[in-house]
Image (tube, helix red, strand yellow):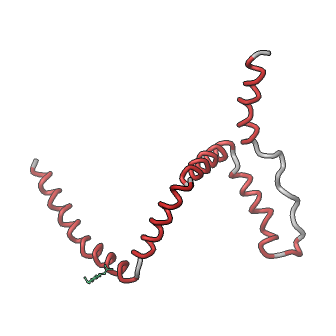
Amino acid sequence: MRLTTFLLPLAAAPLAIGAPEPNPVAPRAPASTGGLLSELPGILDGVQDLLSKDTINNLEIIVSGAAKLLASDNIDVLQDILTNAHSLLTKEFVDNTTTLIGDATPLVEDVSKLLGGVLGTL
Ligand SMILES: *[C@@H]1O[C@H](CO)[C@@H](O)[C@H](O)[C@H]1NC(C)=O
């Protein structure tokens, strides 16, 4: 049996995964349900527009990247980062940082003017 007999279906598989169903949108819900349910068909229409082949390919890349990030050793590291970030973000820290940025802004403007002047003389 020739090699292409095996390889051709494999090459076509990603296309089959990426292709949306011909009509995945369910019939519209009766108007009497109201609320979010009555909005659902419109939302699904919008989602269907989003499901282009390019979008699906990009989502596959993002999801496989996220899956790699969420390996078990990374989860511990991420947990540490989030815990530390959480303890950093006290009201006092945010107030201090806001003050610091406010204090630094005129300084940055002055340095910018100074650099502009220096560069103008070159
Ligand atoms: C906030 O600023 C005050 C005054 O400079 C300082 O004593 C305090 O340690 C700072 N707190 C934090 C969380 O940065």
Q: Where does ligand 1 appear, by image quarter?
A: bottom left
User: Which residue is painted at 83% across and 75% down in the image?
Assistant: 34
Query: Where does the image place residue 26, in percent across and percent down from the top left?
Result: 86, 58
Determine whether, in the image, residue 99 is placed left or right of residue 69. Answer: left
User: Which residue is painted at 88% across and 72% down in the image?
Assistant: 31
User: Which residue is painted at 70% across and 49% down in the image?
Assistant: 51
Where 81 sits versus 18, above or below? below
State which quadrant residue 9 falls in. top right
Where 97 sits versus 62, above or below? below
Quarter in which the N terminus is drawn: top right
For the residue pair 97 and 29, the one nearer the viewer reads as 97
Determine whether, in the image, residue 4 is placed left or right of residue 121. Answer: right
Q: How many marks?
A: 0
State which quadrant residue 7 falls in. top right
Taking the view exactly as shown, the residue that stands out farthest to the left is 121
For the residue pair 88 and 71, the one nearer the viewer reads as 71
Query: Where does the image place residue 41, in percent across and percent down from the top left?
Result: 80, 62
For the residue pair 2 and 18, the one nearer the viewer reads as 2
Query: Where does the image place residue 59, in percent across and percent down from the top left?
Result: 63, 49
Query: Where does the image place residue 113, in percent across and percent down from the top left?
Result: 18, 62
User: Which residue is painted at 76% across and 24% down in the image?
Assistant: 6
Determine whether, in the image, residue 97 is placed left or right of residue 9. Answer: left
Determine whether, in the image, residue 22 is placed left or right of residue 102. Answer: right
State which quadrant residue 57 falls in. top right
